[in-house]
Amino acid sequence: MTNDKLNIIKNEWPLWEVFIRSKAGLDHKHAGSLHAPDAQMAIENARDVYTRRMEGVSIWVVESKHIQASDPGQSESMYDPASDKIYRHPTFYDLPDEVKYM
Amino acid sequence: MAVHSFQEHFDSLIDRDITIEPKDWMPDDYRKTLIRQISQHAHSEIVGMLPEGNWITRAPSLRRKAVLLAKVQDEAGHGLYLYSAAETLGITRDEMYNQLHSGKAKYSSIFNYPTLTWADMGAIGWLVDGAAIMNQVPLCRTSYGPYARAMVRVCKEESFHQRQGFEIMLTLAKGTEIQKKMAQDAFNRWWWPSIMMFGPPDAESPNTEQSVRWKIKRFTNDELRQKFVDVTVEQTKVLGLEMPDKDIKWNEARGHYDYGQINWEEFWNVVKGNGPCNKQRLDARRNAWDEGKWVRDAAMAHAEKRKARTAAVKAA
Ligand SMILES: [Fe+2]
Ligand SMILES: [Fe+2]
């Protein structure tokens, strides 16, 4: 069993993250992941798994191991500095009503 | 942070309905419960293809065949979405396949019943997918992000499954006397297993409370079962069929339909592996895996060849 298992794990195809552009003009958005032997087959599999109902016009795949992510434990030091800078938002500025289209 | 403050942070996220993501700290039991639930769910989608796959070549028209093929293909997709959601919790795909193929993992008992006539394709779509939808819609708001997102995708695709099943039932029910009989027979056979799909009664489902606390589950088994009974009784009237349960009766005080005693002994028997098709389903899964080995090997060899070719071109 153990030998069997090691054997299997060695054979598992790499994991890919799939990003799909739902229509021209929009960003690619993360759709999910899948296993495939290489990038080309990952795109082909992504077509079958994630776009059976015309959900996309373009597919990106990237091997999951290449994704670097921020650490959720550090969210405070990462994002809190922005929370007291409300002057970065247009609503911070009071303009007279006569000013239109600004 | 000390462990207890991790726990406090986690609890406060759950209380505030903030989704837990793969890299967030989570209690071991939350992780384990999710791995078990999501992988069982994935296995159910995969094994669930078998009873219907059985009828693809015998569908009565090209339209029905195309529809059934599309539905079964969707179920494969659902399995894949769910396996990858489970993988974000640290279990590998192969471990999950191993658990399924070794018989260690469970999947929904409903798929251990045989599909005897074409009407079963109607009954399955209508009742089995119907019950699954009832279960799955609240899971779109489950507390673990990758699971919730997979469920949103699944639910979007499920509604055609139930509709095509109902359409088959309706066509048969409005057809000849023999067709109507066939529809009723399928209904009779699938009704009880369908309402068992929601799992044991709340009083005998010890894990429910914790799952509700963690917001993995949003409703209890009995709540969902009642909802399903209520809508199905109304749909049965449209079909002009008889409810297979003679104890179905509107209860004014509760505002729900009462229903008869469920045979839980049968349920546990099937869970333990003694249903009519447990062995057949597992064998079919294992065969598909073993006989698909050459395809996996060929794909890998193809990938390696392609890589070598690209490298050669670059070197030249
Ligand atoms: Fe499904
Ligand atoms: Fe379905």
Image (spheres, rainbow, N blue to C red):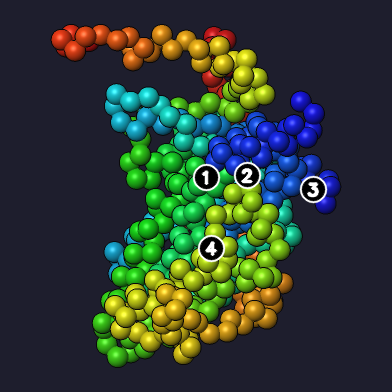
User: Disc 2 marks which residue?
Assistant: B86
**Is disc 1 in the same subunit as disc 2?**
yes
Spatial CA span between label 1 and label 3: 33 Å
Chain under numbered label 2:
B
Work out whether mark 1 precedes mark 2 in sequence or the reverse, and give the earlier one. Answer: 2
Q: Quadrant of the C terminus of chain B?
A: top right
- Mark 4 falls on what kind of element? loop
User: Disc 1 marks which residue?
Assistant: B148
Residue at 46 percent of width and 50 percent of height: B154
Q: Is residue B226 above or below residue B143?
A: below
User: B41 or B131, which lies in front?
Assistant: B131
**Is disc 2 in the same subunit as disc 3?**
no
- Residue type highlighted by circle 3: Asp
- Residue type highlighted by circle 2: Ala
User: Disc 4 marks which residue?
Assistant: B48
Q: Quadrant of the N terminus of chain B?
A: top right
